[in-house]
Amino acid sequence: MGFREDFLWGGATAANQCEGGYNADGRGLANVDVIPHGPDRRAIITGKKKMLDFEEGYFYPAKEAIDMYHRYKEDIALFGEMGFKTYRLSIAWSRIFPNGDETEPNEAGLKFYEDLFKECHKHGIEPLVTITHFDCPIHLIKEYGGWRNRKLIDFYENLCQVIFRRYKGLVKYWLTFNEINMILHAPFLGAGLYFEEGEDEEQIKYQAAHHELVASAIATRIAHEVDPENKVGCMLAAGEYYPYSCRPEDVLKAQQSDRDNYFFIDVQVRGEYPAYGLKKLERNGIKIEMEENDLELLKNHTVDFISFSYYSSRVVSTDPEVNEKTSGNLFASVKNPYLKQSEWGWQIDPLGLRITMNSLYDRYQKPLFIVENGLGAIDTPDENGYVEDDYRIEYLKAHIEAMKDAVELDGVDLLGYTTWGCIDLVSASTGEMKKRYGFIYVDRDNEGNGTLKRTKKKSFNWYKKVIASNGEDL
Ligand code: BGP
């Protein structure tokens, strides 16, 4: 009983949040580089404010991040010491194709990831690679308008052709788009979209999402052609919606919110647009332009597994009196009176993980992979940089217990678990360094000061023990 023997324990990061080296070895600029820390961040992420280059007076945390570009050997050695079986990371598109639309890739960028993957294998770690984690070359946004333009499918296809061939034998687990549903909540992050005054935002978002879905199907096809060993997953920002009350109206609203969330994943897993989604688009006057064989591509190249992030459940209500709101990873939610919250107001709900896993498994009957979960918290290191992060251990322990129940008691097929931000990195929503998730402390603050020294936290040895016992010793 318990987790499968080959269970993939590990941690997750994204290129722009940890690598730095924004212009190293021919890398081009990407959307994620030009999102500053500070009050304008939210408006930029959501496409309300345009920012397509560095501007005076802003601090850009992704420029250097935690400098993993130059320190990956040290970091991977630490992951190896914890016993990681897998390490989820993303490729920065603009390292491979600096502008995105070239025909020839940048060899230095390709070599960087090749060396990094080899380093992983040296430590017995299987890389799990997100092809795009909120990442789009800035040139593709300036020149083509990001994923609103169908041409992006071809550029993404080129990227896939190159990386699947180059990394054959080094990587077999791939995710096509990080949190594909995030396009609805953070379109600049999800698809390089920003909106001009008067534009129909919903129309543009769904059209861009269609392009990503087709690109994802093409990627899946190529991955399987290049190496039948390749396994491709979709990636969902998950979290069950709860009705605030048992009023049928609330229950219906929760169901509809879940469906809005599953919409794109339904396409990637089942191979077709769901009826409820098509009806909703029709009602809202949204018309997706498709080419002749799009539907066939979607049908024929569905994913092998379903990966997702889970930080919190969400709550909805139809009662205007129930209006105490909170957030969780850019998703709005009514405050759940039964749950505690993190310092950023994200509601903490381990049982919600089991519920979410059951819903996903009931819906799709495909293997699941939890590729993000964790607690963003303020850590206070002692004079040696050591952090006693019992709160983090407590959070992860409760979530691992819940996922164990989903496996043991409910029969969910779970491939692995990678905690988010296994080493401290820049927060995607806030651009802060003080919101930390890691087992490894990095000396770096919100303004970019610090030595970048790495120090193991208390949770480091705890997670090592969890992995060594395959989740038995929590
Ligand atoms: C997810 C993203 C990650 C990550 C995480 C935590 O949505 O895939 O990139 O950052 O959320 O969010 P935050 O960094 O805002 O705390």
Image (cartoon, rainbow, N blue to C red):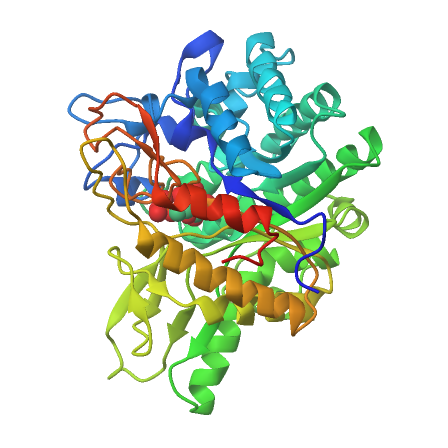
Q: Percent x, y for residue 170?
A: 71, 25
Residue nearest the viewer, comparing 149 with 39: 39
Q: Is residue 336 left or right of residue 305?
A: left
Q: Is residue 319 left or right of residue 463?
A: left
Residue in view at x 33 percent, y 45 percent: 429
Percent position (x, y) of residue 290? 67, 47
| Quadrant of the drawing holding the N terminus | bottom right
Q: Is residue 368 above or below residue 93?
A: below
| In the image, residue 188 above or below residue 353 | above
**Residue 122 or 458: which is nearer the viewer?**
458
Relative image position of residue 222 (x, y in whole percent): 77, 33
In this rendering, does residue 285 appear at all? Answer: no
Q: Residue at x 43, y 18 (%)?
A: 71
Residue 101 picture location, percent across and down: 58, 19
| 292 left or right, relative to 359 | right
Is residue 448 visible in this depiction of the protein? yes
Figure quadrant of residue 335: bottom left
The residue closer to the viewer here, 28 or 313, is 313
**Along the viewing direction, whichever of 406 and 94 lies nearer the viewer:** 406
Residue 469 left/right relative to 297: left
Residue at 72 percent of width and 26 percent of height: 164
Query: Among all residues in the image, which is located at the extreme bottom?
Result: 247
